[in-house]
Image: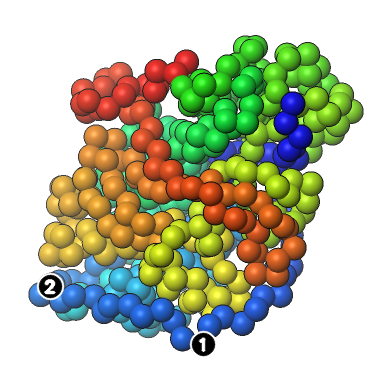
Amino acid sequence: MKTARLLLFVVLLASLVLSACGPAETPVATEPPATEPPATEPPATEPPAPTGLTCAEPIKVGLITDASGVLAIYGQMILRSFMLGMEYATGAPGTAGEVFDFSAVQENTFTLENCQIIVYVADDQSTPDTTATIAREMIEVKGVDILVGTVSSGATATLQGIAAENQIPLIVAPAAANDITGVNFNEYTFRVSRNNYQDAMNLCSYLPTQYSTFVQIAPDYAFGRGSAAAFRDSCTLNGGTFVADDIFAPADTTDFTPYMEQIKTSGAESWIVTWAGGGFIAMMQAAADQGVNETMSLGSTFIDNALMPIFFPNAVGTTSGILYHYTAPQDNAINGWLVFETESRYGVPPDLFDADGMNAALMLVEAIKATNGDTTGAALIAAMEGMTFEGPKGTIYIRPEDHVAIQDMYILTLTNVTDPTFKFYEYVSTNRPEPPCLLPEALKDRCGSLPYGSLGGQ
């Protein structure tokens, strides 16, 4: 029996997906630890190569994120990193600065050769109704050509429909639900964020090397069932065995005692959790009361910097997966620039979703260059399908079949939770998960030769 035990929920798979269970619990408010001063000089970068780009009218972009709602901790990462990404891609900061009070739609203007790019920013508080109102204002009043966002996968589903209805491309960051480029797919939706299948494949590249048998619990709605299927598929393909049927509990469960009894008596070495909302604390309490963590280990991905010291003090020595940590990319000059600028301006290093925000900006600018400033939906779709570009996580490839973003993800070993600059990990390896195509049956032909629906591990 392995001794390492993780005492945390799968935040990467849970906190971003609110489409069927209402608002998630408000993240714990914490003061960031004091950080060491950054280096005095940023890493050397090449200025953008001129392409002769000229635009008759400004290109308008609508960035929708959560600045004050239940997922604001993540929305702020996207806001700062998107603006930094625009600065990196265009070679200069925006002209309006980055102080947002969100009493109205804010804006920053960037210059790319002979084109102006105006970025309008608004706070949707991770509420789909608010997302819809803001998106329509962006389109009908501001006249945006491209949308970017948002944090909540439920709100992103709303945004997808509005973007398609108006034939405006949407770049998704950082929402993770499989459905975004699965059953909710439309040709106008692209993502730079990973999907939940990629999380499962990354973690399951490691878990079955330590544990042979698994059981899992997830919320009883589409996201929970989809994530459970991804973990079952991925971990089975890598040699693991699920010794019991997946356990599904209502999203509003407050008493997890009977579910923990099922997990404890399953005989598994490790239990995997996918959950969204405030029930996690009750789940962990029930697990402690039933002695679950005394007999098996909890499989979990690592999370954002501020919450690691709160929830992971008993997990030092554990090896697990993460989608991004600023120390993980190897010899990456773009990541070095992002780290320097984030530390210099915000007093902290980049966090879990900063790479997603920067990648959204880099993809946007690459698409504008590729179309020579043509912002029609048809032109941008043609440019973004099959696109590759370099970002803080290395090469991003946008699959033309389903618009999934193939990207590096990481396996790290937790060495401490006390470093003042969040240097918590030792690098182990880089993975590049290739998830199956999850398009609905009516669009199956788009998947071509990609594995359809699963990896064949179930």
Q: Residues within 10 Å of mark 2 (few under 14, many from 20)?
A: few
Query: Residue drawn 75% across and 63% down?
Result: 418
Residue extending furthest toward the bottom: 40
- Where residue 203 sits, quadrant-wise, is top right
> Of the numbered discs in the image, which one, if any, rests on residue 259?
none
Distance Cα–Cα, label 2 vs label 1:
32 Å
Q: Which class describes the residues within 10 Å of circle 1: few (<14), some (14-19), or many (20+)? A: few
The residue mark sitting in front, 2 or 1, is 1
Residue labelled with disc 2? 51
Residue drawn at x 38%, y 47% is 407
Q: Is residue 157 visible?
A: no
| Residue type, numbered disc 2 | Thr
329 shown above or below 50: above
Q: Nearer the viewer, residue 142 or 357?
A: 357
Q: Earlier in the sequence, mark 2 or mark 1?
A: 1
Q: Which residue is mark 1?
A: 40
Which residue is nearer to you in this view: 329 or 323?
Answer: 329
Apparent side of residue 127 relative to residue 250 in the rendered image (left or right): left
Q: Position of residue 20 (x, y in %)?
A: 57, 31
Classify residue 301 by image quadrant. top right
| Residue at (34, 40) in percent of width and height | 404
Indicate the position of residue 143 as horizontal and vertical percent values: 29, 61
Quadrant of the snapshot with the N terminus: top right
Marks 2,1: beta carbons within 8 A: no
- Residue visible at 10% across and 75% down? 52
Q: Amino acid at mark 1?
A: Thr
Which residue ends up furthest to the right in the rendered image? 289
State whether residue 328 is above or below residue 241: below
**Would residue 357 be found to the left or right of residue 211 on screen?**
left
Q: Please provide percent x and percent y for residue 346.
A: 58, 76
**Who is closer to the viewer here, 252 or 215?**
215
